[in-house]
Amino acid sequence: MNTRHDIASTAASGAARRPAIGVLMGDPSGIGPEITVRLLSRAESLQDARIVLIGARSVLAAGEKIAGIQLDPLFIESTAHLPDAPGRVCMLAIDDIDSSEIEIGKMTVASGRYALAMLRAAAGEVAQGGLDGIVFAPLNKGAMRLAGLTHEDEMRLLAELLGVKGFVCEFNVTHGLWTSRVTSHIPLSEVAAAIKGPVIQDAIAILDRNLRAAGVAAPRVAVAGLNPHAGDGGTMGREEIDIIGPAVEAMRASGVDARGPLPADTIFVAAKAGAFDGVVSMYHDQGQIAMKLMGFETGVTVLGGLPVPFTTCASGTAFDIAGRGIARIEGLAQALAINVSMASRARGR
């Protein structure tokens, strides 16, 4: 069989159907490399997309050793003319770390530096039009900060690298329920001052837009209050009356099915029962605690507002079990499925 000819002949027809998805192995000291290898070794992971692994050969080798699986990727020079190789993982090798620098289960400068380098490489491929989406295994913000990250998080870094000036937001997805946040990785003491009407409207709008991109035809969006009992008529704070309520009404007037502000301690009870497709929370843990209780192992984080979908599993680097081969892959598998679905819909528009 002429493999080169077969790959070339399928590229034209396959490229039109299957999106190109870049996959990053995450922090090399955590569970990322091993769960990435296990995920990409499954035939179903390669059915609906052209998968491009972006990373160092040494990190892949470490993941393969822990997983006990050999991926045997097809090495490429760039994603500009990506072949369609059914059942095969392509790899863009960026050898930015030496295997001796990897310390499994430890937060290190080297691991953070590698993670940042891979994010920059992935953003570069997206900017050049070679990839339709990016999936990344768990990162460690502490390691990236040790290595020089000055942004609030990786999402803000990616927004800068990709020239995004508008509102960006993390979504968490569990069992089909999506959440967005008005504020994210800032101290709790700064949250109340950051709750502004235009930002609330942005968080509602971006959630509605991404739910539609994921296939929800008429999203129902619930908006949480900031204070206990959603302010209880102003007796526990006026943010709901003065800021959140008017923002919700403005979005309703624009055609978005937004409801609230609703008490944060019951909003997820209704959402879990199917009353809403998405919830806008006011700060990080207001939504994260509920979502992780509902499905920590299968939860997905989507970075909204970027040119293509960026997704990851909601669980972290799990340094305590890294290297033992017992980490579960369900969350990363869901992250890949959501990414492929969103990227496919975008290509079809």
Image (cartoon, grey):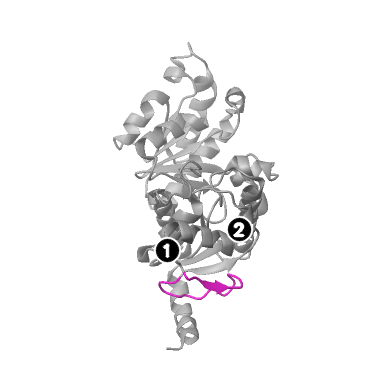
**Residue 244 in picture, x, y percent from top left:** 51, 27
- Looking at the image, which residue is at 37% across and 63% down? 42
User: In the rendered image of this protein, does residue 192 appear above or below residue 120?
Assistant: above
**Residue type at mark 2?**
Ser
The secondary structure making up most of the magenta span is: loop
User: In the rendered image of this protein, does residue 56 appear above or below residue 285?
Assistant: below
Q: Which residues are magenta?
A: 72-88
Q: Earlier in the sequence, mark 2 or mark 1?
A: 1
**Residue 226 in picture, x, y percent from top left:** 49, 23
Quick one: SS at disc 1?
loop
Q: Nearer the viewer, residue 65 or 271?
A: 65
Q: Residue furthest front?
A: 100
Residue denoted by label 1: 69
Left or right position of 300 against 25: left
Q: Nearer the viewer, residue 134 or 16?
A: 134
**Residue 65 in picture, x, y percent from top left:** 47, 60
Q: Residue furthest left?
A: 273
Question: Magenta span has 269?
Answer: no
**Disc sitting over residue 99 in the figure:** 2
